[in-house]
Image (spheres, grey):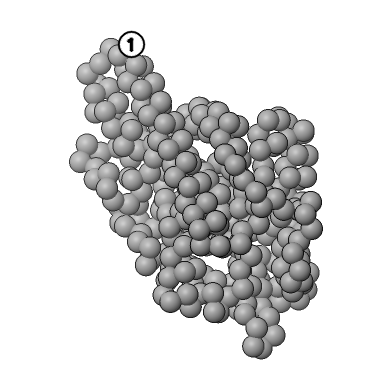
Amino acid sequence: MDQMVGQNVQGQRDKVVIIMGATGTGKSKLSIYLATRYRAEIVNSDKMQVYKGLDIVTNKVTWEEQCGVPHHLLGIRDPYTDFTVEDFCYSALHAIESILSRGRLPIIVGGSNRYIEALIDGDESKFRSKYNCCILWVDVSMEKHYPFLSERIDQMVENGLIEELSEMFDPNLDYSRGIFRSIGVPEFDQYFRTKPYLNDENCEMLLQKAISEMKENTWDLAHRQLKKIHRLQYGKGWGMHRLDATEVFGKRGKEAEEAWKDCVGGPGLRIVAHFLKDITKQAPADVIAVDHES
């Protein structure tokens, strides 16, 4: 597309796409899928992925997965420092303006809903007065989502999570600061502290305990994120477009990819197309589902 995608004519608000959802629902995949079809750049809104390091633990998209799409606020911050809500709002606004200045569409994506809420509704809602937002919500039923999250953590362990944590472990770590607040870091503290003094059996027992705690805390995070999204959608009337990805999580391989395009990618593409063309009428009923029960 050759037109200035995110920018509007004088007097109209510039356009921003926002993708929300609980951890592990496929937000990043959708953002990259949309960005490769429009002239778009991605602004990360995951408060742990903003830090350098622990790429497996924080589940950052890899260079290959980014498909050449520019990503902002991803892996840029010193892991020992704090990145506050105020820091995010300032940095995100700067990134948005930079993206728009190049005639591209900003896509904000991540699971830190408190940061997104502060960006959109904070500062006397100046964001809403300046930008026209299209908010996509990728949703998955808990019945399908929780087993997937467990499998994902098992895969992270296979991909080198323990080795990655071992390289950054320090007995004097402050788990209330920086990247070390990430789920998957404090859970392994006891394992790394006592590992040199334990036999193989007890060591394995502690390792499995840490992995189980990481899974439980990830489930809790997903539940809190979903609860927050419900409040924003049904309590504050954010008008999100809900994309139900549940069917995808019951399939594997080619079938899963086809289901994703049918349930998430295709509908998301059509919703954004309506948004960018200034079509104000509601998207067709077969494109979005507004009812949700978990």
* Residue type, label 1: Glu
Query: Where residue 176 sits in the image (x, y, percent)?
Result: 27, 48
Query: How dense is the environment of label 1, judged by Cα within 10 Å: few (below 14), some, or many (20 and up)?
Result: few
Residue 41 visible somewhere in the drawing? no
Count of number-bearing discs: 1
* Left or right position of 73 against 81: right
Instruction: Return the residue at label 1.
Output: 201
Please state if 87 lies on the left or on the right of 274 as rendered: left
Label 1 residue SS: helix
Quarter location, residue 107: bottom right
Is 31 left or right of 272, judged from the image as shown?
left
Figure quadrant of the C terminus: top right
- Residue located 58% across and 31% down the image: 143
Q: Nearer the viewer, residue 192 or 121?
A: 121
Residue visible at 71% across and 63% down in the picture: 272
Left or right of 36, for residue 56: left
Name the quadrant of the N terminus: bottom right
Q: Position of residue 55 (x, y in %)?
A: 47, 44
**Closer-to-camera residue (123/105):** 123
- Tell me the residue at 30%/14% (across/down): 202
In the rendered image, the residue lying farthest to the bottom is: 10
Residue 32 screen position, x and y as percent: 65, 54
Residue in the image at 30% along x and 26% along y? 191
Q: Is residue 78 visible?
A: yes
The one nearer the camera, 77 or 138, is 138
As displayed, is residue 104 above or below residue 37? below
